[in-house]
Image (cartoon, rainbow, N blue to C red):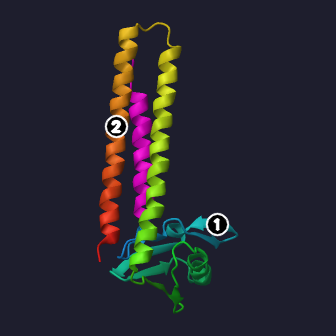
Amino acid sequence: MFDTSKERKAMEEVAARFNDEMKKVRTGRAHPDMLSSIKVEAYGQFMPLNQVANVTAADATLLVITPFDPSTIQAIASAIRADQALGLNPADDGRVVRVPIPALTEERRKEIVKNASAKVEQAKVALRNVREDARKGLKAAEDLSEDVKKRAEKEIDDLTKEFTDKIDAAFKSKSEEIMKL
């Protein structure tokens, strides 16, 4: 019998990576995960923002970043400003960095959904690659009968469909959230 647990684990990792990417996609509301891709130059190296500061959503339109070391405040503001994809303009008062989240226009919402759909396609390609690797493994296995190979191939196809459906559902939910005013 062919064990598909390795393929399931690989597909779960693809889905988890996709969900992490979707958390970073900007919606109309402020969310600390929006800044999870920011790297700040601190102490002579680039570090993730969450390792040099605490990020909280004060309300639906404002993120507040409290640095652990006040000397990194300028570097934090510069790193956020430098990420053009976010289009945010932080302001600091010497103690905290405030990042106002501007309202999204209809055009910008459509652009965000389009960018997110590219991430969907990347995730689906990764799923198909896992499926293809499993099929190659099946063809190379000489100790399995044709019936077992066919059943295993069907299981792998079902797994691929299951995870593709999960990714599609997550994207549909996220795009509805983005397009909602």
* Above or below 11: residue 180: below
State which tag comes first along the sequence, 1 or 2: 1
Q: How would you rate the neighbour count of disc 2 (Cα within 10 Å): few for under 14, some for 14-19, many for 20 or more?
A: some
- Which part of the image, by quadrant, shows the N terminus? top left
Q: Residue at x 41, y 39 (%)?
A: 11
**Quarter of the rendering containing residue 30:** bottom left
On residue 161, the disc is 2
Looking at the image, residue 134 sits to the left or right of residue 169; the answer is right
Q: Is residue 51 magenta?
A: no
Identify the element where label 2 is drawn. Answer: helix
Q: Position of residue 96 (x, y in %)?
A: 48, 86
> Which residue occupies the foreground of this view, 9 or 147?
147
> Which residue occupies the foreground of this view, 48 or 68?
48
Q: How would you rate the neighbour count of disc 1 (Cα within 10 Å): few for under 14, some for 14-19, many for 20 or more?
A: few
**Residue sitting at the far bottom:** 93
Q: Tell me the amino acid under the disc marked 1.
A: Phe
The boundaries of the magenta stretch are 1-24
Q: Tell me the amino acid under the disc marked 2.
A: Lys
**Quarter of the rendering containing residue 75:** bottom right
Q: Residue at x 36, y 49 (%)?
A: 167
Q: Position of residue 168 (x, y in %)?
A: 34, 50
Magenta: main secondary structure equals helix
Q: Is residue 9 magenta?
A: yes
Looking at the image, residue 140 sits to the left or right of residue 148; the answer is right
On residue 46, the disc is 1
Residue 1 in sight in this render: no
Residue 164 in sight in this render: yes
* Above or below 47: residue 30: below
**Quarter of the rendering containing residue 44:** bottom right
